[in-house]
Amino acid sequence: MNLAFIAALLVSPPDTLEASSVTARRNVSPPSESVSGVVLRDAASAADAIRDFSGIQLRDYGGVGGLKTVNVRSLGSAHTAIFLDGVPIDNAQNAQVDLGRLFTEDLETIELYAGQKSALVQTAREYGSASSLHLRSSLPDGRKLRLKLRGGAFGTISPSGSAETRRGRFAARLRLGADRAHGQYPFHTLDLGKDTLLTRQNCDIKAFRAAGHLWFLPRGGRYEASVNWYDAGRGIPGPVFKQSGKYPMSDDRQYDRSLTAQLSGEQSLGHGLSLLVKGRYSLDILDYLDVSELDPSVSATWNYNLQSAYAAASLGCQALPWLHLNAAVDAQADWLTANVNARRQQVLGAFSSAFILDPWRIQVSAQYQGTSDGYRFLSPALLVDWHPRFDWEFGFLGKRSCRLPSFNDLYYTNVGSRDLRPEKVWQVSAWWLWDRSFGPWSFRIREELYFNHVTDKLIAVPNGSLFRWSMYNIGNVQVYGDEWSATSAYTAASWQAGITARYSFNRAFDPSNPWQIPYIPLHSGSFNIFGAWKSFRADIRGQVTGVRFAAASSRPEAYLPAFTTWDMTLSWKGPWGLRLAVELRNITDTRYEIVKQYPMPGFHVMGSVSVEI
């Protein structure tokens, strides 16, 4: 086995090693980002909860109900797999999951891995992603009723409530929630060199969501079933640019109805065997009203009906005290009924072996996927992890992965779409971690160097309509990066304090063009500090984003300046589970755009009151 092959087999770092008595003696902390507790409780959505993570670029098209997607290490949002309780949330239609629709009230943690989550028993889907975002639901610990009302700027009002119970080996939760906002906010723009104040229009949203969750917890196992319903209508705010002597305001509308039902079960079978099974069915109905900005009397309606069925089984085996094996098979079928109908059946298989000889761990895995429309791909992986001491960890990892063309790429285009090749990625990464506690003080420092090489990059070029594009494969993209994070916390009898700082350097370019690829800042970072005393808590969050360009060039019209935003949350916990919180967003009233010509809101205030009985 030569060095080139070893470098081609690298994979992301592992989870806690929980599979055997040998592995239980130490805890491997992967280079991942996670959020839990008060940050999840105060977040408006999953997108809001993870916005401080290093190495990511959140796309936000403005408005309370605007589309929000995550791009990890410049690979594109389609390379990030989203999992809810280990079951994938995906979209064969356009390969993007709107994080603004994923709410956090009942989540225990959100974890982001630059590569898949390398648990010793997992599904075949989890082995092949370039990056993955895992949302884990919290398990009820008793009988509780929770009520919450959140509202404030832009006419936002979001009531929600849940009832949960746990008796013996059974637990259940029911949650209902709604969102309503006009979404209008002022923004500044230059009109013939003059600073002009306008109001963002067509940003309203009305949404209703309902979720039910059941758990059965037998000895050595865990079984879950959940059903989620989402129904929303929203305006789609268009770009702000000069055209025909005025600023056109989009009148486009989008209506979503989504039903998802999923099952999962994990059971120890004895003799070192563990079985994992998962299943999901989803129905997504999207109606889009496309109104011409030049002539509002001209419009077109686009209707999409996407059904998806998914099933997975995984068998883990503790073959020897130092050897763990895992084999997994997944199957998925997607049907899109629209102006053009499309179908895809997909089978994935994966095998992994983990060799655990303290202080070393080596994990080798491979995932194969094949589809009914002719795509075949193999994703091999290798991890080498070294713990010379309990507080130090070093790793060298990487992998190969791919992004399949979506239904929109293949069928809703004009030129050359039927022969698209998958977008392939090689990932290589090296990292170190120091994690230590001294009495009430705790410290954690991490650095990770990485290199990504993308071939057959999928490129979209507009061709006369927002819904009809020309798709083709072109060249390659290379990404070099360095991520740092440092955390320190102090815990005393009646108060706590902590600080976290993150920095990312990200150089992403096409070798045939020296300019940074669009929307990727060379430098970015975040800063978090909190302090809590008895029933009071204050959180301050700062986010720094460097200069970006909306196109791979230095043309002035593509320039997006650097910006820094600061937020603060003040909260108080009272008797009977009462909690009051005030969120001050964009305190410095910074003018900025995440996406060119989509201005973001300035200073605004949100508040919430919740009670737990």
Image (cartoon, rainbow, N blue to C red):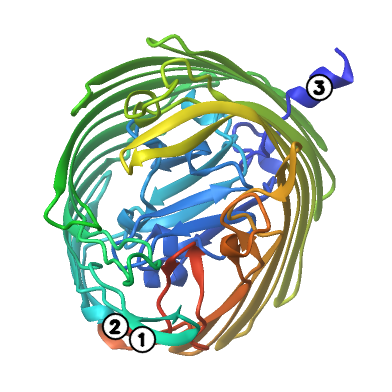
Q: Identify the amino acid type marked 3.
A: Ile
**CA–CA distance in space, label 3 to label 2:** 53 Å
Numbered circle sitting on residue 330: none
Q: Which mark is in front, 1 or 3?
A: 1
Residue 66 appears in view: yes
The residue drawn where x is 34% and y is 40% is 464
The quadrant of the image that shows the C terminus is: bottom left
Report which residue position mark 1 lands on: 605
Residue linked to disc 3 = 6
User: Of the residues shown, which amino acid type is indicated by label 1?
Assistant: Val
Q: Position of residue 402 (x, y in %)?
A: 56, 26
Disc 1 to disc 2: CB gap under 8 Å: yes
Q: Is residue 164 above or below residue 128?
A: below
Name the one closer to the observer, 304 or 267: 304
- The residue furthest front is 244
In the rendered view, tell whether residue 205 sits above or below residue 533: above
| In the displayed structure image, the side of residue 130 where residue 348 appears, left or right | left
Tell me which amino acid carries mark 2. Ala
**Residue 302 at what x, y percent from top left?**
18, 39
Mark 3 or 2, nearer chain start: 3
Return the disc, 1 or 2, that comes first in the chain's sequence: 2
Report the number of numbered marks: 3
Residue density around tag 3, few if under 14, some if 14–19, many if 20 or more, within 10 Å: some
Q: For mark 2, what is the residue?
A: 153
Measured in 3D between alpha carbons, the distance from the residue under mark 1 to the one under mark 2, in whole angstroms, is: 6 Å
Residue 396 falls in which quadrant of the image? top right
Q: Nearer the viewer, residue 403 or 236?
A: 236
Structural crowding at the residue carrying mark 1, measured as other residues with C-alpha within 10 Å and reported as few (<14), some (14–19) or many (≥20): some
Q: Position of residue 473 (x, y in %)?
A: 56, 26
**Which badge, 1 or 3, comes first in the chain's sequence?**
3
For residue 193, side relative to residue 20 (left or right): left
